[in-house]
Structures are given as C-alpha cells and as structure tokens.
Amino acid sequence: MRVLGIDPGLTRCGIGIVDAHPGRTVSFVHVAVVTTAADLPLEERLMRVAAGIEAVLDEHRPDCVAVERVFAQHNLRTVMGTAQVSGVALLAAARRSLPVALHTPSEVKAAITGYGQADKRQVGTMVSKILKLDEIPRPADAADALALAICHAWRQPVVVPGAPARAGGSAALTPAQQAWLAAERSTGKSAVARRLAR
C-alpha cells in the first residue's frame, strides 16, 4: 500500500510518500515541500499548491491520502491558510477517487514517537530512523508529511494476496507502535486498537 501524507500549509505544504509492507514496515518513496510567496494573491498560491499536490499524485499514484486535521490556533490567518490547503488536498484526492484520512498532530506524534506531545525534532528523528534515512528531512514540513504517511500506514492492515493471517498480534509492532496502541486502549478507542493489533 502506498500512502501520501500531506502537511497542509499555505507558505509550505509538506508532501511525503511511503510504501507499507507486511510486518508493519514502511519504506521511503518521495518527499517534497511546495512553497508559495506571501505576496502572491491567495488564489495564485492555492493554484500552485494544488499543482504541486496533483503532480505528485499523478507521478507516484498512491493508494490513499492522509492529511493533517486542521485544529484551532490563536493565529486565525494561519489556521485559515491551513484549512484552505486542506480543502485543495481533499479535492485533488477526491478527483482521483482516493480514500482520505484525517489525523490530528497529537495522533501522529503518538504513532511515531510514542508520545503525543513530542516536538518537531523528536518527530523528525524518529521519521529518519523508521525510514532508514541518512538525515532528518528538512524543513520540518517534509518530516511531518512523512510522519503522517507512516501513521496512516501503521493504522491500516497490509494484505498480501494468498498469505496466511499473521499471528502474534502487537508483539510484531515497533516500540512506538506498541506505546501508541497502549495509549489508544487506555483512552477507550478499542476499535482503533483492535485494528492496529491485527
């Protein structure tokens, strides 16, 4: 399964792609950041972001898209830009009939590091380790997009045609995945926990 993660932003929109494999392993495919200048008209900025997202969708043909869920911020202008780019990403995915999932920042941090309040450096460090990269993807928007893709990949069962069901449950998960699974169970999100443990 190929997953495209999008960290929406009007100035910098992170785009990261990973392939999910049996055994809850993931491999790096692509990462990029689409940038737009603040002095451009809003419609021009959105068009450029849309073109960047659509080019990646058409080149790499992911099976699904994961987008960071917009959450409230004190800076209304920032959250508006993020929401607008999220809409552009959702539209691009819908035009290609791709399923879309929204993940909160704390959900992604918990999945990647085992701690929902991890800082950007911690997330970037874990992303580079998980994907066996030589360095942390930069800027942070790039690492965040890959983290989104990894988070979503880990939440979905990877089915190999003709292969028997994998035994062992959560024992085959990474330490970060096990911590996230425990956190999900403790908050009563049993359906998500059961899906991850399969």
Image (cartoon, helix red, strand yellow):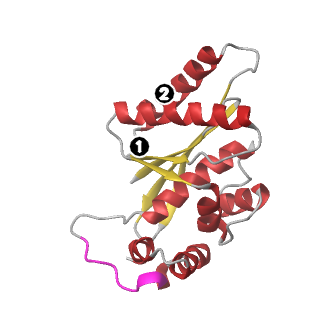
* N-terminal label among 1 and 2: 2
Inspect the image, locate mark 2, and give the three-letter code of the amino acid beneath it. Answer: Ala
User: Looking at the image, which is closer to me, 129 or 170?
Assistant: 170
Name the element at disc 1.
loop
Residue found at x 41% / y 36%? 93
The quarter of the picture where residue 162 lies is: bottom left
Q: Position of residue 117 (x, y in %)?
A: 73, 65
Is the residue 198 above or below the residue 57 in the image? below
Does residue 9 appear in this view? Answer: no
Q: Position of residue 161 (x, y in %)?
A: 23, 64
Real-space CA distance between mark 1 and mark 2, rounded to the nearest whole angstrom: 12 Å
Residue found at x 78% / y 57%? 121
Q: Quick one: quadrant of the N terminus? A: bottom left
Q: Quick one: quadrant of the C terminus? A: bottom left
Q: Position of residue 132 (x, y in %)?
A: 63, 60
Is the residue 33 above or below the residue 142 in the image? above
Looking at the magenta stretch, what is its main secondary structure?
loop
Residue found at x 55% / y 19%? 47
User: Dot 1, how many residues are within 10 Å of its Cα: few (below 14), some (14-19), or many (20+)?
Assistant: many
Mark 1 = which residue? Answer: 62
Inspect the image, locate mark 1, and give the three-letter code of the amino acid beneath it. Answer: Pro
Q: Which span is picked out in magenta?
A: 163-170
Asked if residue 160 lies left or right of residue 74, the reply is left
User: Looking at the image, which is closer to me, 165 or 97?
Assistant: 97
Mark 2 = which residue? Answer: 55
The quarter of the picture where residue 103 lies is: bottom right
